[in-house]
Amino acid sequence: LQPAADQELVHMVNKIFKESQESDLDSIDPISLIPNSAAMAEYPKLSAACCNCPMIAQVRYFMLREINKLVFQALNYIDFNEMSSHGSLAHAIHTARDRLFWGAKHHWMVSFMLRGRVCREKPKSLRLEPLKAVMLPGEVDVEAKKTMFAQAFRALMEKDWFLVDPKEKGNAFEVVLVDLHAQDAGGPYREAITNMCKELQSESLTLLIRTPDCKAADQRKQIQLWLPNPDATSKLECEMLQFLGKLMGLAFRSGRFLELDLARCVWKHLLNLPITLEDLKQVDKSWYGVYKRFEEMMKGSCPEDFDSSGCTFTYRSLTGNTVELVPGGKELDLGWDNCTRFLKLYRKAREDEISAQCAEIRKGLTAVVPPEVLALCSPSELQAKVCGAMEINLDMLERHTDYNGYKKKLEAGRGVLAYPAS
């Protein structure tokens, strides 16, 4: 099988485990691995590999299962400091992380975190002033003293309360909302975390910005995606980004998710994974269009037909500024002879634009979640551990829906709808 087909098979198995709430690799029914019509649409690479012989998926699962067992037996003896060394076992396992089943992977992650430092003390109180955090439209908490995120940052940055037991999944602290007389039985904690995420994804703080596509589009008609602000470079902002990383690590360990809508490239930066053109396209389709136009022009035209449309060695940054790709780039015209160099610099500049800020977030994240654990995560798995699953199980939703007084009707493209029985 091709790697993509293997990854789809692992995704299918993970989904089966999640629905059955099983984690034992030997418990799966091999018959469930034969792709049906629904699976063919969801897993096209796997379906193509199994079109002549449906048994291929079952055989491949048995092979991956045995490989997984061997990997997880050896993981405790692997030095992940050698992960960047090609040819090392750590590098091989890191490269194959998408072919490790989540149930077994998660079990190892929990046991590894339990072997490190764990805060087992009774949760302490975190006093927050929600009335102080009320911001006027357009107001920015520049000094990081008013917002709930800033209040929590100043109170918790040097604490080790984030190292909660990943098995117990308890709250790291009890929230006291000053002047509101709220006793924390879970509600104030969730409210505080929710408000912090709202502040992060707003104009109240300078740590995150919307992607260029989200700025240009109708904000009511699409999910807003956010990125670290490339201009967040001050000492205070770097420390606050590290605190954001610690909150991510807390969500990873505790299962108390953060309501953050971060672009896919952010999760890849946090895992030190390469950024693809598709990742950059998700952030800024205008940037992608320029890149593809000149790339296709270099492939299919001759020097006489090359049209740079007055472009120079500059690009528009995520914050809307014109940045030179080389010293004197504003005066250096783009032409056939230097277009290949331009494309390389143009892509490199966009890939690296938020790398410094993501590195600060990763510092905080790895202070709570060991790098060895992150080494086994794919971007989607890290996102799910921090922000929760991005998928809604419609079958489970339908099974738990009471149609009392209504009747069920299936409509193409709209799913299951309920209408009054009359």
Image (spheres, grey):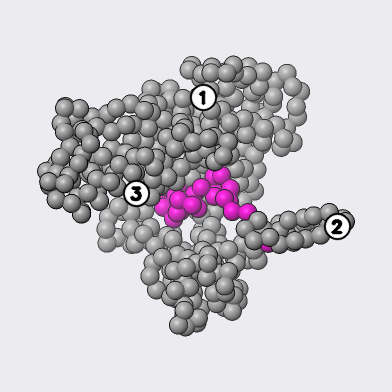
Q: Nearer the viewer, mark 2 or mark 1?
A: 2
At which x and y percent is residue 218?
A: 53, 35
Work out how far the residue at label 2 is from the one at label 3, CA to CA, in angstroms: 50 Å
Work out how far the residue at label 3 is from the one at label 1, CA to CA, in angstroms: 28 Å
Q: Amino acid at mark 1?
A: Glu
Q: Amino acid at mark 2?
A: Ala
Residue 266's image quarter?
top left
Q: Earlier in the sequence, mark 2 or mark 1?
A: 1
Q: Which residue is mark 3?
A: 277
Task: Name above or below for residue 115 compared with residue 239.
Answer: below
Lateral position of residue 35 relative to residue 347, left or right: right
At which x and y percent is residue 406?
A: 83, 56
Residue at 21% across / 33% down in the picture? 310
Q: Earlier in the sequence, mark 2 or mark 3?
A: 3
Residue at 33% across / 44% down in the picture? 289
At which x and y percent is residue 319?
A: 38, 28
The label shown at residue 203 is 1
Q: Is residue 163 visible?
A: no
Q: Which residue is mark 2?
A: 421
Lateral position of residue 408 relative to residue 384, left or right: right
Q: Earlier in the sequence, mark 3 or mark 1?
A: 1
Q: Is residue 381 magenta?
A: yes
Query: Helix or strand or loop: what does disc 3 sit on?
Result: helix
Q: Quadrant of the N terminus?
A: bottom left
Q: Amino acid at mark 3?
A: Leu
Q: Residues within 10 Å of mark 3 (few under 14, many from 20)?
A: few
- Please provide the residue range marked out in magenta: 370-395
